């Protein structure tokens, strides 16, 4: 059969199909036409629905640049992204500040927390349940009301965080800031980084007010908000067993990554994939 005949037959078949489809639509019942129109309208509305804003909340001993890999990927995929500076002064004060940031955003948000940031996104969600579409915990604490970071981190063996790996600086107005010792930073926090990268991270780390690690969470994960959790299998700051236990307790959809504690910096692709799943 020649190409011209083949094309003609194909075109004819398509034309007949279009005719039959048109005829079927013309003879459809009013109810069927209404249902079809509603489906098309719903599909169009979903296609044009704006994407939620992704709010990335960093933890202690780091700053918001730890999310650089995720920010690049998410913005390329069309998501608006906010990675606010976290004061690291205390659970209540930090979460109050971040709640105000979230409330300045129009539309739904997906909250993503790393480490200590998990305590904060839990409280933000409790403060503003209607705006929060989903919660993503990335090697992060998932508290119940009344629990502290220190309680959660010592609930299972395996953490290197302690007096041997940290030091404190007394603040002029009272209180202390906790830092990770530069010699311990890579083993504790950034084992997937090169020695040079870890040294830079250690030198630029942001301290946490020591009392924040013993400040109880005011709330647990609110009911009705989908929860996702990434467990870092080689975490030496928060024991992986603790991350897994807390994730199961929160009824989270769990992913595991072969990573040290700084999973947002070392595995941005894996973290972004979970965030996008939560945002759909």
Image: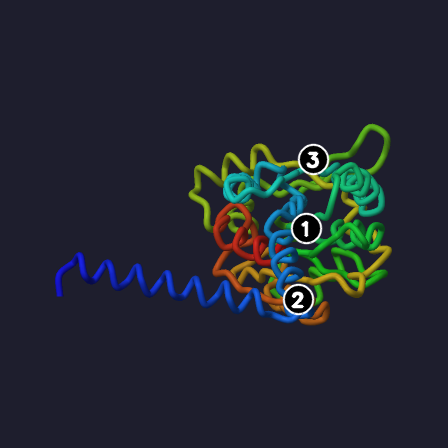
Discs 1/3, front: 1
Residue 24's place in the image compared with 185, above or below, is below
Which of the 4 image quarters holds residue 140?
bottom right
Say few, some or many: other residues with alpha carbon within 10 Å of mark 3 (under 14 / 14 to 19 / 20 or more): some
Kindly identify the residue that appears in the image at 46 percent across and 38 percent down.
197
Disc 2 target residue? 35
Residue 183: x and y in percent read 53, 42
Kindly identify the residue that appears in the image at 25 percent across and 64 percent down.
9
Disc 1 target residue? 110
Of the two numbered discs 1 and 3 on the same chain, state the one appearing first in sequence. Answer: 3
Instruction: Report how far apart the C-alphas of labels 1 and 3 lie in the structure.
Output: 17 Å
Residue 106's place in the image compared with 187, above or below, is above
Which of the 4 image quarters holds residue 278?
bottom right
Kindly identify the residue that appears in the image at 70 percent across and 48 percent down.
109
Residue 142: x and y in percent read 72, 60
Residue 9's place in the image compared with 212, above or below, is below
Q: Quadrant of the C terminus?
A: bottom right
Disc 1, SS: strand
Say few, some or many: other residues with alpha carbon within 10 Å of mark 1 (under 14 / 14 to 19 / 20 or more): many
């Amino acid at each position: 059969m020649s190409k011209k005949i083949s094309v003609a037959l194909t075109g004819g078949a398509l034309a007949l199909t279009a005719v039959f489809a048109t005829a079927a639509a013309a003879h459809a019942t009013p109810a069927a036409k209404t249902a079809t129109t509603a489906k098309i309208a719903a599909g169009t509305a979903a296609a044009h629905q704006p994407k939620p804003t992704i709010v990335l909340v960093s933890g202690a001993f780091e700053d918001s640049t730890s999310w650089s890999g995720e920010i690049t990927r998410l913005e390329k995929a069309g998501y608006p992204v906010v990675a606010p500076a976290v004061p690291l002064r205390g659970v209540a004060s930090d979460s109050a500040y971040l709640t105000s940031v979230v409330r300045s955003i129009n539309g739904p948000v997906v909250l993503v927390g790393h480490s200590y940031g998990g305590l904060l996104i839990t409280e933000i969600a409790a403060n503003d349940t209607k705006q929060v579409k989903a919660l993503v915990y990335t090697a992060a604490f998932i508290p119940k009301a009344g629990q502290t970071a220190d309680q959660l981190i010592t609930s299972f063996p395996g953490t290197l965080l302690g007096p041997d790996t940290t030091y404190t600086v007394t603040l002029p107005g009272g209180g202390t800031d906790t830092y990770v010792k530069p010699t311990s930073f890579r083993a504790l926090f950034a084992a997937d980084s090169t020695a040079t990268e870890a040294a830079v991270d250690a030198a630029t780390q942001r301290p946490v007010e020591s009392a924040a690690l013993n400040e109880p969470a005011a709330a647990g994960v609110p009911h009705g908000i989908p929860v996702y959790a990434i467990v870092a299998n080689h975490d030496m700051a928060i024991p992986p067993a603790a991350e897994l236990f807390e994730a199961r307790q929160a009824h989270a959809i769990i992913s595991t990554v072969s990573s040290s504690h700084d999973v947002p910096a070392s595995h941005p692709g894996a973290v972004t994939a979970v965030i996008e799943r939560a945002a759909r």
